[in-house]
Image (cartoon, rainbow, N blue to C red):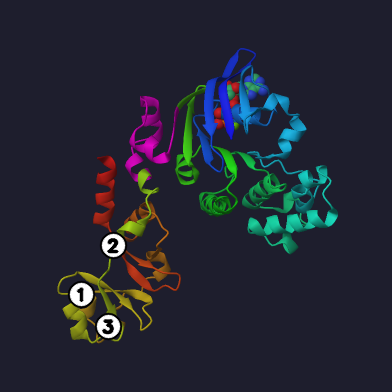
Amino acid sequence: MIRLEHVTKIYGDTLAVDDLSLEVNEGEVCVLIGPSGCGKTSTLRMVNRLIEPTSGRILVNGKDIRQVRPERLRQSIGYAIQSVGLFPHLTVGANIATVPELLHWEKSRIARRVEELLELVGLDPKEYAQKYPSQLSGGEAQRIGVARALAADPPILLMDEPFGAVDPLTRERLQAQFSSIQQELKKTVILVTHDLDEAIRLADRIAVMSAGKLVQYDTPEAILSRPASKFVHDFVGADRALKRLSRISIQGFVHPSPSIGVNATLSEAMAALQSHRSAWVVDHQGQLLGWVDQTTLSAAASVREAIVAQDVTEISLSSSATLREALSRMLGQGFKSIPVVDENRRLIGEVTLSDVEAATAEAEA
Ligand SMILES: Nc1ncnc2c1ncn2[C@@H]1O[C@H](COP(=O)(O)OP(=O)(O)OP(=O)(O)O)[C@@H](O)[C@H]1O
Ligand SMILES: [Mg+2]
C-alpha cells in the first residue's frame, strides 16, 4: 500500500532521512518512533509530498507518487499534525469541512459528514460544530484534528504525534478511541510518536528510527522480545517485560474464583474460606459487591457486614483488559488477585499475580 524505497532526505548539510526502505500494508498501523530529530516528521511529509525526497522513491498503491499531483495525492491522504493546526478563524465545523469543500461536495453532504465525524470522535455536534478552536481544550482540539484528517474518508492517514499535547489520562482515552475507530475503518496509517507505550498499544508494526535510519521494523511483540540492536534494546528500556504485558489480553488467564453469595451464612462462608485466604462476594444476580477474608468474617455478624466495601469499579477489570492493567491494579491496590466482571458487573473470575508472573516468564523464554 505505502512503500518507501531507499528514501533519503538531505536539508543543506543535514542528513535527515538516510536510505530508508519501509512497507506499510493496507489496513495496518505503522508507528514511527525514535529520538527527537531522527527524521520521523520528514519521513511523513515525504509521503504526502509536502517535501520531496533527495533520492529514492515512494509508491502508494504501486504508483510512484511523483506521478500524482500533490493536491490530488493529499485528497487520498488524511494528515493530522502535532500542533493540531486548526484554522483559528474557522469554526470547528468549517475546519472539519476543509477537504470536502475543496472537493466541492454538496452542502448537505458536508453537513452530514461533519456531524458524523464529531460523533465518531465523541463530541456532541450540536455543542461543538459552532465553536472556535480557541474555545477547545487540548484534547478536544486533537480530536478535531483527527476528525478533519478523516473528513474525506481517505484510505491513508498520516498522524504526527496526534495525541502528544494532552495529559496522560486524556491520551489514554484518545488512544482507546483511535483503536476502536481504526478497528472499524481499517485505514492504512503511519503514526509518529515519542511514546513507546502508545506505539505498543496502537501499532501493528513499529518502525524504530535512529539518526535517519530504520533500525528495526517489526511487531511490538518482536521489538520487545528481540530488540535487533543495543540501540533498540536501550530504547525499549529495562521494563520491556512489563511493556510486553500490555500486548497480552487477560482473556486467556481468567479462571474461576472463590466467591460467596451475600446471603450465605457465616459458617458457609467460613467453610468456603478453608482453602482460600479471601473470597469475592456477589449478590443474587452474581454482581460483585466486594470481598471478605477470615479476619473480617470472624468479626462480623453476617457476610454482608463483613464485606470490605471497596469501590468495585476501582478493583475490577473487564475481560478486554490487558495483563499490564491487571498488574497495575494489583500494585495499586495491594491485591494478589483482581476480579474480572462482565458489562453488568457480574463476576466472571479472577486474574492472579502468579498468572502475570507466568506470562512474563513465558514471554522471557
Ligand atoms: N526544513 C528543514 N530544514 C533544515 N533542517 C531540517 C528541516 N526540517 C528538519 N530538519 C532537520 O532534519 C532532522 C530530522 O528532523 P525531523 O523533523 O524529521 O525529526 P523528528 O524525528 O520528527 O523529530 P521530533 O521528534 O523532534 O519531531 C533534524 O536534524 C532537523 O533539524
Ligand atoms: Mg517531528
Find residue 74 and report its horizontal and vertical position in percent: 72, 36
**Which picture quadrant has residue 87?**
top right
Find residue 35 and report its horizontal and vertical position in percent: 50, 29
Q: Quadrant of the N terminus?
A: top right
SS of the residue under disc 3: helix
> Does label 1 or label 2 sit earlier along the sequence?
1
Of residues 19 and 67, the one nearer the viewer is: 67
The answer to if 184 sits in the magenta stretch is no
Within 10 Å of disc 2 (Cα), the crowding (few <14, some 14-19, many 20+) is: many
Q: Residue 337: which disc?
A: 2
Q: Residue 334: which disc?
A: none
Q: Is residue 88 visible?
A: no
Three-letter amino acid code of the residue under disc 1: Thr
Q: Residue at x 64, y 43 (%)?
A: 155
> Does label 3 or label 1 sit earlier along the sequence?
1
Image: 210 above or below 244: above
Q: Are marks 1 and 2 in contact (CB under 8 Å)?
A: no
Image: 101 above or below 57: below
Within 10 Å of disc 3 (Cα), the crowding (few <14, some 14-19, many 20+) is: many
Q: CA distance from mark 3 to mark 1?
A: 12 Å
What is the span of residues highlighted in magenta in the rendered image? 216-243
Q: Quadrant of ligand 1?
A: top right
Q: Nearer the viewer, mark 3 or mark 1?
A: 3
Q: Residue at x 35, y 48 (%)?
A: 245
Q: CA distance from mark 3 to mark 2?
A: 20 Å
Three-letter amino acid code of the residue under disc 2: Ser
* Mark 1: C-beta under 8 Å from nearest atom of ligand 1: no
Residue at label 3?
A: 303
Residue at label 1?
A: 295
